[in-house]
Amino acid sequence: VKGLRKGSTQAIRMTVPTEEAVRDYPAYCESYLPRTVMGLHCSSWCNGGMEGERICGLWPGSAAHADVVRREPRWEDSSYPHCNEQGNRLVYFGNGWS
C-alpha cells in the first residue's frame, strides 16, 4: 500500500531496484532456503523437478515474516524515474498553496 501511495502521489513511473539489491536478494535466499525442508534433496516444482537444483519461486521465510518485511519498504534500494514532463522529483509539492 505504501508503494502504491508513493507512486500515485509522486508521479513515479516505475520502481527500479538497485544492482546491489538485485545481487543481495538471491544471496539471502540461497543462505536461507537450504536450512528448510526445501533444502532436502528431493524433486518438486520449486527446483524444476530436478533433485538438488536451485530453489526458486519461494519467499525466504514464513508468511508472517513476509508481512513484517513488506510493512516497511526499503526505499533506498530502488530508483524512481518520474513521469512528469519536467522530470523534477518534487513536482508533487504542487503550487505551494494547497
Image (cartoon, rainbow, N blue to C red):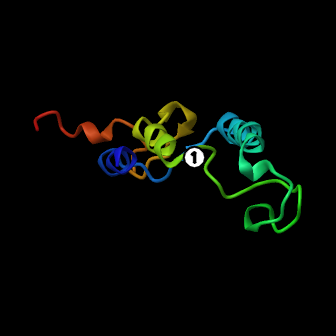
User: Which quadrant holds residue 21?
Assistant: top right
Q: Nearer the viewer, residue 60 or 85?
A: 60
- Asked if one can make out residue 88 in the rendered structure from this viewpoint, the answer is no
What amino acid type should be assigned to the residue bearing mark 1? Val
Residue in the image at 48% along x and 38% along y: 69
Badge 1 marks a residue whose secondary structure is strand
Left or right of 7 on screen, residue 14: right
Left or right of 21 on screen, residue 89: left
Left or right of 50 on screen, residue 11: left
Tag 1 residue: 16
Residue 6, percent from left and from top: 35, 44
Residue 49, percent from left and from top: 83, 68
Residue 52, percent from left and from top: 89, 55
Residue in the image at 44% along x and 44% along y: 67
Left or right of 44 on screen, residue 78: left
* As drawn, 43 above or below 89: below
Q: Nearer the viewer, residue 9 or 98?
A: 9
* As drawn, 76 above or below 42: above
Q: Nearer the viewer, residue 96 or 2?
A: 2
Q: Nearer the viewer, residue 14 or 98?
A: 14
